[in-house]
Amino acid sequence: MSAPTGGPPAPPRIYLSPPHMSGREQVYVNEAFATNWVAPVGPHVDAFEQEFAHAVGARHAAAVSSGTAALHLALILAGVGPGDEVLCSTLTFAASANPIVYLGGHPTFIDSERTSWNMDPALLAETLAARARSGKLPRAVILVHLYGQSAAIAPVQAACDRYGVTLIEDAAEALGSTYHDRAPGAFGKLGIYSFNGNKIITTSGGGMLVSDDSALVAHARKLATQARDNAPHYQHSEIGYNYRLSNILAGIGRGQLEVLEERVQARRRNFDFYTERLGRMAGIEMMPEAPWGRHARWLTCITVDAAQFGVDREAIRRTLEAENIEARPVWKPLHMQPVFATCAAVGGDVAADLFARGLCLPSGSSLTEADLDRVCTLVESLHTN
């Protein structure tokens, strides 16, 4: 006879940012099965590219297997090769910089500013000016739009244009946000988005590359399809990759894109709920919304002053985890990552401080008020000052 396990059942898991299906996706998936378009490419891929380009205000788009694949292709199209320097935001996920290394390039990490937590345009301008004086400009700049917040694009773009450096926007986390009423990701020479399972909309795994340059996007599609030449036999004149999105996943993406605005509004409501309950507490500050556009609030992020609040962000995270609630520290800056220990950095104190005090709270668009209340009640219980 087995011993009784004892104790109440664990409360249901609250995830950081789970997928949220609308039901509309199934229509497109069923159509893909009914027509036997289950392989990469197909009518849903073509339609998803067109619909997505329209949604973000870009002229052309190429659907690929991940945001990382899109960024890899963007760097290839920008001409990045062995020994080239690429300037990149430091407060971001490693995937923003890994493709630089794939190509033999060298990332240099630029610190954040506090208004948006994104790349500091003044530091970027100083760095580009210094590189110009040395006669060795970087090949590209990767500007990340973090947690649903657009970076200050105009001064970054102006600095890149001044020195003829290609601007690539990593908008993997920022679909649905705005910069002066336009979508970030569609300003630079190339932009990329992610449809990973935790993003505002998802295809389970997938990404998109956008540009106003039709030749660049056509080249991206070729590279993403093993770079097969236009010939009746299998002929290849350059190295390619197996990066195209499947027709089934593109169908999911079409259904998700139809509810993008609903998903953004739901996440902004989450932020409002957290702000009302937690934002007035001593020692907690909400991630700001920059004055230049709408924050999509992919994730609701806070910073914690332990001296004022009573405990640090890690104590909050551990308390939530003990109650089966997922929360995570903000991204560990790339200049602090062991894998990039030999890479150069410009500044870093702002990003390091945000990492030390920052916490991402559950932010899924399917969260209920009861879920949000459960999170807030636990955080409130730790406030000792």
Image: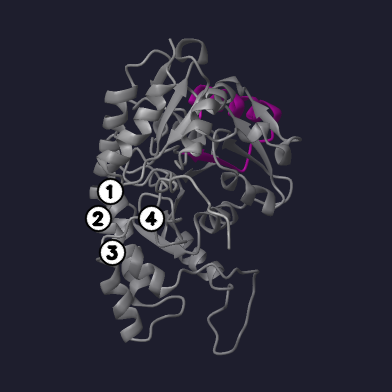
Q: Kindly identify which residue carries mark 3.
A: 255
* Type of amino acid at the residue the image marks with label 2: Val
Given contact means CB atoms under 8 Å apart, are the residues at marks 4 and 3 in contact? no
x, y percent for residue 211: 41, 54
* Type of amino acid at the residue the image marks with label 3: Gly
x, y percent for residue 250: 38, 68
Q: CA distance from mark 1 to mark 4?
A: 11 Å
- Residue 151 vs 194, above or below: the answer is above
Q: Residue at x 30, y 24 (%)?
A: 277
Q: Which residues are magenta?
A: 118-144
Q: Secondary structure at mark 4?
A: loop
Q: Could you tell which of marks 4 and 3 lies nearer the N-terminus?
A: 4
Q: CA distance from mark 4 to mark 3?
A: 13 Å
Q: Which mark is residue 259?
A: 2
Q: Could you tell which of marks 1 and 4 lies nearer the N-terminus?
A: 4
Q: Could you tell which of marks 1 and 3 lies nearer the N-terminus?
A: 3
Q: Kindly identify which residue carries mark 4.
A: 19
- Residue 218 vs 57, above or below: the answer is below
x, y percent for residue 244: 49, 69
Residue 175 visible to an observer of this rendering = yes
Given contact means CB atoms under 8 Å apart, are the residues at marks 2 and 3 in contact? yes
x, y percent for residue 304: 47, 20
Q: Secondary structure at mark 2?
A: loop
Q: Secondary structure at mark 1?
A: helix
Q: Nearer the viewer, mark 4 or mark 2?
A: 4
Q: Residue at x 64, y 74 (%)?
A: 237
- Residue 346 vs 365, above or below: the answer is above
Q: Nearer the viewer, residue 61 or 194?
A: 194
